[in-house]
C-alpha cells in the first residue's frame, strides 16, 4: 500500500478495547498482516483516516467480547477512505476477509462445543435407532453453518512482464506521437521550401510526393521500432518480436496516425501550429488511450477512449496478440473497425491535401 513499503494496511481501533488486541497477532507467511495504531476516541481515529495516516478504522463497541462469547450477535463498525477506489477495494477486502475467517472459526468452535454436549446428553437409543454417528452429526451441523465451501485453485495464466508492457508502450508512442508529428511537419517544411510547388509544375504529381512522404515516414517509424525492440533485448534481455499480423496492426495504426497528422497540417498550414495541435491531441492520449498507463488503472470515464479510439484499440489488440497469445479471430472485428476508421481519416486527409495543392497552383 502507499503508506508502508511492506505493503501492509494500517488499521486503527479505539483504546482501550481489548477486543482489538488480536489484530496484532494476525500474520500471513510469518509477516504481520496489520500494522495497528490505537486511538483514545473515535474522532481522532477518523481524523487520521481522513488525513491518509491510516487506511481503515475498526470500532469495537463496548461489551463486544461479552456479547460475542455469550452467543449473541455482535457488531463491529468499519470506516474506510473511498477517495482512492483501488486502495479501498484492497483494504476493505483484507479487513472484511479477516472478519470472515474469524466468523468461520467461531462457528467451528461453537459446533465442537455443541457436539460435546450432544455426546453427553443425546439419547443413546435415538443414535442407535437412526444409525447416527458423531461424525455424521458434525457434517450436518457444519453444512448448516456453511452450506458452500469455496476452494481456491491457482492457475498460472499468461501475464505481461513490465518490460513487455513498456516495449508495447514504446511502439504506441511511435505510431501515435512520432508518426503524426513527422508527416505533418515534414509536409509543411516541403511546402515552405517550395518543393511541392516545383513538383506541381513538373511531370511528377503531388500525389507522387504524398505517397513518397508517407512511405518515407513509415520507413523511419519502422526503423525506430525495430531499433527500440533490439535495444530492449540488448539492455533488458527481453523484447517482443511481432508476428505478421502484429506488423499489419502497426501499419494500419501508423497509417491512421499519418492521416490525422496530415489533416492537421493541411488545416493549420503552419509548422508551429501543427506541432502545438499534435502535442495537444497526443499527450493526453498517451495516458487516456492506454498507451503508457494500463487500461485497468484508468478512470471509468476514460476507458472507452482506450477501447474505441483507433490507436488505443490497435495497441490493445497488439498486446492481446503478441503478449497474451490471443487468436487472430478474437481481434479480427477490431482490425476491421480500425481499418475503416483509417480509411475515413485518410480520405479526409487527402481532401485537405488536394485543397492545399490547388491553392499552390493558383
Image: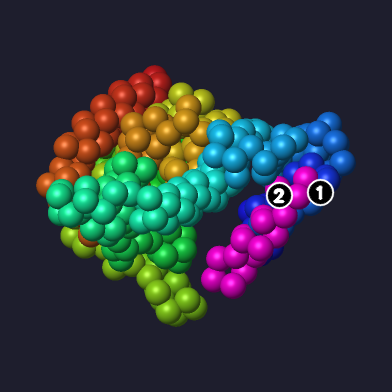
Image coordinates of residue 330 in percent, x first then y, are 17, 45
Asked if 345 appears above or below 219 in the picture, the reply is: above
Callout 2 touching callout 1 (CB < 8 Å): yes
Is residue 23 one of those drawn in magenta? Answer: yes
Quadrant of image for the C terminus:
top left
Crowding near the residue tagged with mark 2, few <14, some 14–19, many ≥20 C-alpha atoms within 10 Å: some
Image coordinates of residue 34 in percent, x first then y, are 66, 57
Residue sitting at 43 percent across and 79 percent down? Answer: 237
Quadrant of image for the N terminus:
bottom right
- Circle 2 residue: 20
Asked if 250 appears above or below 51 in the picture, the reply is: below
User: Number of marks in the image?
Assistant: 2
Outermost residue on the left side: it is 329
The quadrant in which residue 205 appears is top left
Image coordinates of residue 351 in percent, x first then y, are 30, 23
Q: Front-most of 128 and 34? A: 128
202 left or right of 97?
left
240 left or right of 336?
right
230 left or right of 298?
left
What is the secondary structure assignment of the residue under circle 2? helix
The mark nearer the N terminus, 2 or 1, is: 2
**What is the CA distance from the residue labelled 2 to the residue labelled 1?**
9 Å
Residue sitting at 40 percent across and 74 percent down? Answer: 238
Residue sitting at 78 percent across and 45 percent down? Answer: 17
Q: Front-most of 225 and 159? A: 159
Q: Is residue 73 visible?
A: yes
- Circle 1 residue: 38
Magenta residues? 17-33
What is the secondary structure assignment of the residue under circle 1? strand
Amino acid at each position: 500500500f502507499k503508506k508502508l513499503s511492506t505493503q501492509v494496511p494500517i488499521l486503527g481501533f479505539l483504546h482501550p478495547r481489548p477486543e482489538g488486541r488480536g489484530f496484532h497477532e494476525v500474520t500471513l507467511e510469518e509477516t504481520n498482516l496489520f500494522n495497528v495504531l490505537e486511538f483514545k476516541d473515535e474522532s481522532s481515529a477518523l481524523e487520521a483516516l481522513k488525513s491518509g495516516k491510516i487506511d481503515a478504522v475498526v470500532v469495537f463497541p463496548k461489551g463486544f467480547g461479552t456479547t460475542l462469547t455469550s452467543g449473541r450477535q455482535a457488531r463491529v463498525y468499519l470506516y474506510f477512505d473511498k477517495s482512492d477506489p483501488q486502495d479501498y477495494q484492497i483494504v476493505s477486502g483484507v479487513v472484511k476477509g479477516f472478519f470472515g475467517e474469524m466468523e468461520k472459526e467461531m462457528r467451528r468452535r461453537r459446533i465442537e462445543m455443541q457436539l460435546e454436549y450432544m455426546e453427553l446428553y443425546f439419547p443413546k437409543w435415538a443414535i442407535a435407532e437412526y444409525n447416527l454417528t458423531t461424525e455424521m452429526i458434525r457434517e450436518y451441523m457444519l453444512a448448516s453453518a456453511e452450506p458452500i465451501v469455496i476452494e481456491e485453485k491457482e492457475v498460472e495464466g499468461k501475464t505481461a512482464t513490465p518490460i513487455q508492457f513498456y516495449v508495447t508502450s514504446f511502439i504506441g508512442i511511435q505510431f501515435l506521437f512520432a508518426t503524426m508529428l513527422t508527416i505533418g511537419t515534414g509536409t509543411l517544411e516541403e511546402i515552405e521550401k517550395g518543393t511541392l510547388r516545383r513538383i506541381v509544375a513538373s511531370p511528377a504529381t503531388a500525389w507522387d510526393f504524398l505517397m513518397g512522404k508517407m512511405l518515407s515516414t513509415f520507413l523511419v517509424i519502422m526503423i525506430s521500432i525495430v531499433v527500440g525492440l533490439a535495444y530492449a533485448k540488448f539492455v533488458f534481455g527481453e523484447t517482443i518480436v511481432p508476428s505478421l499480423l502484429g506488423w499489419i496492426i502497426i501499419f494500419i495504426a501508423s497509417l491512421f496516425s499519418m492521416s490525422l497528422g496530415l489533416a492537421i497540417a493541411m488545416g493549420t498550414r503552419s509548422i508551429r501550429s501543427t506541432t502545438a495541435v499534435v502535442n495537444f491531441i497526443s499527450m493526453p492520449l498517451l495516458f487516456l488511450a492506454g498507451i503508457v498507463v494500463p487500461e485497468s488503472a484508468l478512470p471509468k470515464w476514460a476507458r472507452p477512449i482506450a477501447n474505441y479510439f483507433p490507436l488505443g484499440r490497435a495497441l490493445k489488440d497488439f498486446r492481446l496478440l503478441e503478449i497474451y497469445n490471443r487468436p487472430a479471430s478474437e481481434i479480427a472485428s477490431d482490425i476491421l473497425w480500425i481499418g475503416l476508421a483509417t480509411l475515413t481519416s485518410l480520405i479526409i486527409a487527402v481532401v485537405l491535401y488536394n485543397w492545399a495543392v490547388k491553392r499552390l497552383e493558383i
